[in-house]
Image (cartoon, grey):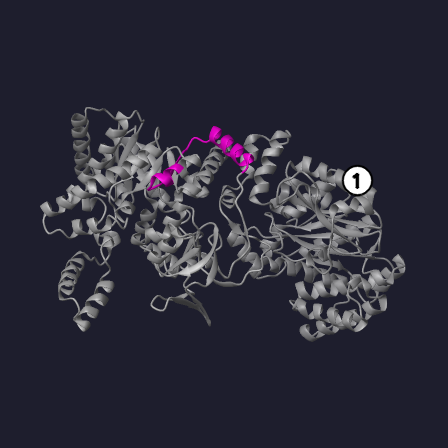
Amino acid sequence: MTKFVYKFTEGNADMRNLLGGKGANLAEMTRIGLPVPPGIIVTTEACLAFYQQGEQFPDGLEDQIRQGIQYLEQTMGKKFGDVSDPLLVSVRSGAPISMPGMMDTILNLGLTDKSVQGLADKTGNERFAYDCYRRFIQMFGDVAMKIPGEKFEQALTDLKAAKGVKLDTDLTAEDLKELVQQFKAIYQEHVGDSFPEDPYDQLLAAVHAVFASWNNERAKVYRRLNKIPDDLGTAVNIQTMVFGNMGQTSGTGVAFTRNPATGENVLYGEYLINAQGEDVVAGIRTPEPIAHLKDEFPAVYDEFHRVAELLEDHYRDLQDIEFTVQEGKLYILQTRSGKRTAAAAVKVAVDMVREGKISREEALLRIDPAQLVQLMHRRIDPEAQVEVLATGLPASPGAATGKVVFSADEAEVRGNNGEAVILVRTETTPDDIHGLVPARGVLTSRGGMTSHAAVVARGMGKPAVCGCEAIKIDAENECFTVDNITVKKDDIITIDGATGRVMLGAVPMIEPELTGDFETILAWADEIRTLGVRANADTPRDATQARNFGATGIGLCRTEHMFMEPSRLPIVQEMILAGTPEGRREFLAKLLPIQEEDFYGILKAMAGYPVTIRLLDPPLHEFLPKIEDLLVEITELRVTKKDPARLSQLQELLRKVRALAEFNPMLGHRGCRLGVTFPDVYEMQAQAIFNAVSRLVKEGVEVYPEIMIPLVGIPAELELMREVVVRVAEETKQREKVDFEYKVGTMIELPRACLVADKIAAHADFFSFGTNDLTQTTFGFSRDDAEGKFLPTYIDQKILKENPFAVLDQEGMGQLIALAVQKGRSANSELHIGICGEHGGDPESIDFCHRTGFDYVSCSPFRVPVARLAAARAELKNRKK
């Protein structure tokens, strides 16, 4: 028969998968001789078997629980349910991975109408006994029987008011007896049966409730948010009760071995005299700082300080400890690795290395790379009271407060004048870039995590909430509504790009702090990682920012963003609408010196490092006015008959725009297909790049340009475009009498490119995986539609584990990438391989890139520190394997 129940004395810290984190730690503390009340653990295997059998206990479990209670009776010299000296237990959950606050606890189990009097007689403290009993009825009713907790709280509040007291501790024994009867009446009303008088009935119902709580809504949400598997199950810890509510020499508390907010090496926590554990976190009374324990109970404080140091040294990590003092004696009820802020995580890791407790490698593995983002952006004060208006996708981290504006032009003017504005749009397009730059943040009702607004905001380090479909935007009247609430232009809102929340009014913020410890951690990461880390940057400012964050090159410079500058957009539009090659070249000649200056600035900002410049990628119609906007203006001119010349001009423009329109532009006339049909566009861009390179070489600046041809799926496409780039480069060298290195490669973003990667590699110096489009074309998903419409449902229903646009799909797309790497290098052993999609900043995806043999990852500038740490962790984890 399967062993479902273990004594604390039978376990240790290595058994957390079976005994849960809490149970394993209780067993470990028992093993090393700490004052832990005895107990037993029902295993996670029992929980899984419970679900496999339709939420019924597996055979043998009840008998093993009864045998475990008999062991506790022998150990404690008490009897479960005894009317003169009853054994009481607590029942707590404990999953293998810590899930604080997600599962439910029951204290004082074993009390009945008869045994409560025995407890009163044994302790000589009737008030204490009935205080335990009323707490037990409330917890059991709430946790095991799903009676709304507020029903009990209201009865308690009403009784205190009737007795004229403020605190629970002011109620007398007679008052508590009265409360017990009220609580039992509430129980009877909701359950339809009297409160159980058999302690074993109580215990088995409590174990059943803990198992069931594994799948309560808050537990499922917590697991989804923290990527904890659903098939771990929870253990149940049944532990002999010790009492902090036995009077003024008793108490209970929670403490951390270091400050979990700052990382400072001081005991941090709170305690309450004459209380049980739940009181500390329930907010019913105001706890005292742990430092005051030294004054009230100096011997207890000294013992606790010793135990805290011992536990931190034993586990070699910051510990979160629950304790109870019963009549002057200290008991340890739980220890676990403490949750901490990003700032504390960094400081604790660095300090512990300096103290000789852990190695540098362990320090790097202790810090979640995603936490570093918190240190680099403003964020909402977690203590702040906020009014959440709506929730969208957390598209770019950070938080911002500002006045609502609905046009990029207005955002530009007011933002540049120093006003804090939030740009609110249905969705953004590249021609909104001038408004995005000065805005504090962006909110869109459509679009996903890799939409234009999301990508641009991440690159700039600005917060963005996208795909917030709950807001209904009325651009004409400059307002948006959520249910019955209307937000007008100039109203103040706050957006939280880390959670997707949109809030009314200004909200308190926490400013970012980058300490010396932050730099120390990243320096250690750089010593270990083998993956290079570059940045996606389109301007000299972005390039400088990326370099300051530790990027060693640019993995993606998108030239289309340069075309969207308001001063040059008319030239671009004239070039597109030119009816002849000659006319097109006339406007390309005007763009050439402008592009040259763009590339000069970026190459100079990243001197000494490679800069990968992607030639024009989006379809040409993206640079033209929208058909809808043209139709509105044409209709207005027709009706008013104001300007016939302008009307004629717009009608001709509409004809050309319609001619360029496509049914599916993402799979249409874009990328290298533009280069093939309009080679003079790519030729102009190549000339601008190499002109800039020549100038910098003459100035003594070290530059390494890499020209990337987008959307190649047919080897001949790259062969043809490479010839154009190489010809321009060699002609420039001869004309300018300079020499320089350069590379020509392609962005792999189509499944076909992966399948014929060996043939493409014959014409490439490098591959860079554009995983945003590769995800779309692999899944057959339209990115913005998928994230806005059905992907959340797919993730909720576990059709997909993660959003494939945020975390690389290793099972499907990963096979295509691995195949492309293998085939590409089989044909060209010198082939350099990187990734420049948004996955380049995701820790899980970075680990995949490390294992697949990539040379570098590239991500937005503000993700560079995350990527540096994630790359080091990937090296360490895979080194162990």
Residue 600 lies in quadrant: top left
391 with respect to 162 (left or right): left
Crowding around mark 1 (Cα neighbors within 10 Å: few <14, some 14 to 19, many 20+) is: few
The residue segment tinted magenta is 515-544
Amino acid type of the residue that numbered disc 1 sits on in the rendered structure: Asp
Residue bearing mark 1: 302
For residue 879, side relative to residue 22 (left or right) = left
Q: Residue at x 20, y 52 (%)?
A: 573
The secondary structure that dominates the magenta segment is helix
x%, y% of residue 345? 58, 41
| 65 falls in the magenta region | no
**Image-quadrant location for residue 315:** top right
Place of residue 385 in the rendered image (x, y in percent of width and height, measured from the top left): 58, 60
Q: Position of residue 13 (x, y in %)?
A: 65, 40
Query: Is residue 208 in sight in this rendering?
Result: yes
Q: Secondary structure at mark 1?
A: helix
Residue 808 appears in the figure: no
- In the displayed structure, 675 sits above or below 785; it is above
- Which sits in the foreground, 777 or 157? 157
Residue shown at the point (16%, 29%) measured from the top left: 731
Residue 540: say if magenta: yes
Q: Is residue 412 left or right of residue 394?
A: left
